[in-house]
């Protein structure tokens, strides 16, 4: 029986563990550096029909119907006046049980945790060192040492596993943008509403059947190195309120009054794709590559990568990285294009962008690949 260490208890690591739990040819442990797994926040995620298909294989249908939502459209608006630009019909790409879905991240995490025995998740256990000689010897912060046949790095954008493997080369870079997350209640539009402004965009969408909505704002913001490293800055209420007031002044929605439970954080993205030279080491989720959030498919890609890796391990296929690199380049390209197009400020460029959006929204074959 092959032993697998999963470093990190995010969506990608937990989904992979669900697949391994059903396969008795593997044993595994999850090592999480935090002393708990956050599964009570109210922030939302979007899941493609393809990732829902994969989740259905591990019992996603069991989730309470009131805890998910199936938006039918993505509607683009001009933030300044809420004038509709165009819309994408999501329902045309759905299948009976595989529909584009929005929900709280915590709802998905709770579902993934249900199928994993508690003793297989080791909390407060931060990786310190990796040695390889026939097997991997892993040293953790608590001075525990274990041996494994495989390492799966699922420990996020600032992956400690990746830093050890690549000697801190290729660290993620600040994307000159800040994200604000929050919640809104009783918003009028039940679809995914995407508001485009000058150097910013924000998205509001329902996350369940209880009139709860997720809010995410992406704002271009240059910061000096000391500011980026100052975690207190992103918890400072006056700093957050100034950002929200700035966007509210350029929008006809009073975000300052409506958005609650706001969290602020700098956006970091991967600098390059890195492949470990040591056999049997795999990177998934943000540990493999972290995108800008302008495509809203981070969670879906984490699930797809977990499924691809499981198939690789089960069938001893050599194609995991080949497949993941191709998909990553596609998502990176689309995310970068969205970030650029959503934040245009020149009126002429905005005019032509809006025409392009109206034209593109009618291209079914393009969006079938995008939202599958």
Image (tube, grey):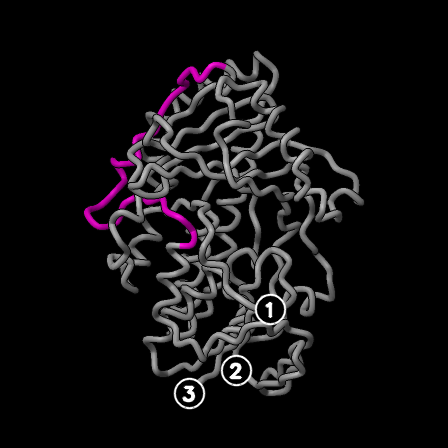
Which residue corresponds to mark 1? 33
Q: Quadrant of residue 129?
A: bottom right
- Other residues around mark 3 within 10 Å, as few (<14) / some (14–19) / many (≥20): few
Q: From the viewer's perspective, is 322 left or right of 159?
A: left
Secondary element at tag 1: loop
Looking at the rendering, the stretch of residues picked out in magenta corresponds to 81-106
Q: Is residue 98 magenta?
A: yes
Q: Disc 2 versus disc 3: distance between alpha carbons?
A: 9 Å
Nearer to the camera, 34 or 139 = 34
Q: Earlier in the sequence, mark 3 or mark 1?
A: 3
Mark 1 crowdedness (10 Å alpha carbons): few <14, some 14-19, many ≥20: many
- State yes or no: discs 3 and 1 in contact (Cβ < 8 Å): no
Question: Which element carries disc 3, helix, strand or loop?
Answer: loop
Of circles 2 and 1, which is in front?
1
Which residue: 31% across, 47% down?
68
State whether residue 286 appears in this view. yes
For residue 1, which numbered disc appears in the image? 3
Left-right relation of 268 to 285: right
Could you tell me which residue is drawn at 60 percent across and 19 percent down?
345
Q: Secondary structure at mark 2?
A: loop
Q: Nearer the viewer, residue 341 or 70?
A: 70
Q: Quadrant of the N terminus?
A: bottom left
Who comes first in sequence, dot 2 or dot 1? 1
Name above or below for residue 164 compared with residue 73: below
Whether residue 334 is visible? no
Q: Quadrant of the C terminus?
A: top left
Residue occupied by mark 2: 149
Q: Position of residue 144 (x, y in %)?
A: 63, 84
């Amino acid at each position: 029986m092959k032993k697998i260490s999963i470093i990190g208890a995010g969506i990608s690591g937990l989904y992979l563990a669900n697949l391994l739990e059903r396969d008795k040819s593997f044993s595994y442990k999850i090592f999480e550096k935090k002393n708990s797994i956050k599964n009570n926040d109210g922030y939302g995620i979007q899941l493609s029909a393809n990732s829902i298909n994969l989740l259905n294989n591990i019992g996603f249908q069991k989730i309470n119907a009131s805890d998910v939502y199936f938006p039918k459209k993505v509607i683009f608006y001009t933030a300044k006046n809420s004038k509709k630009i165009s819309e994408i019909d999501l329902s045309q790409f759905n299948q009976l049980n595989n529909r584009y879905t929005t929900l709280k991240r915590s709802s998905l995490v709770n579902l993934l945790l249900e199928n994993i025995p508690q003793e297989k998740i080791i909390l407060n256990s931060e990786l310190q060192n990796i040695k390889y000689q026939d097997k991997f010897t892993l040293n953790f912060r608590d001075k525990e040492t274990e041996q494994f046949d495989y390492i799966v790095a699922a420990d996020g954008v600032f992956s400690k596993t990746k830093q050890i493997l690549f000697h801190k080369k290729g660290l993620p870079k600040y994307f000159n943008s800040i994200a604000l997350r929050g919640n809104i209640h009783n918003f009028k539009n039940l679809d995914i509403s995407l508001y485009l402004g000058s150097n910013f965009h924000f998205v509001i969408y329902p996350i369940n059947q209880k009139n709860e909505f997720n809010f995410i704002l992406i704002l271009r913001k240059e910061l000096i190195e000391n500011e980026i490293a100052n975690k207190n800055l992103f918890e400072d209420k006056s700093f957050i309120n100034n950002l929200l007031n700035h966007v509210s002044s350029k929008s006809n929605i009073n975000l300052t009054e409506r958005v609650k439970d706001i969290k602020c954080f700098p956006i970091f993205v991967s600098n390059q794709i890195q492949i470990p030279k040591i056999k049997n080491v795999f990177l998934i989720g943000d540990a493999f590559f972290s995108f800008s959030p302008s495509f809203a498919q981070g969670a879906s890609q984490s699930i797809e990568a977990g499924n691809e890796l499981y198939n690789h391990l089960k069938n001893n296929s050599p194609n995991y990285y080949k497949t993941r690199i191709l998909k990553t380049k596609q998502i990176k390209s689309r995310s970068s294009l969205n970030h650029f197009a959503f934040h245009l400020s020149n009126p002429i460029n905005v005019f032509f962008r809006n025409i392009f959006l109206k034209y593109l929204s009618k291209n079914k074959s393009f969006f079938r690949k995008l939202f599958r």
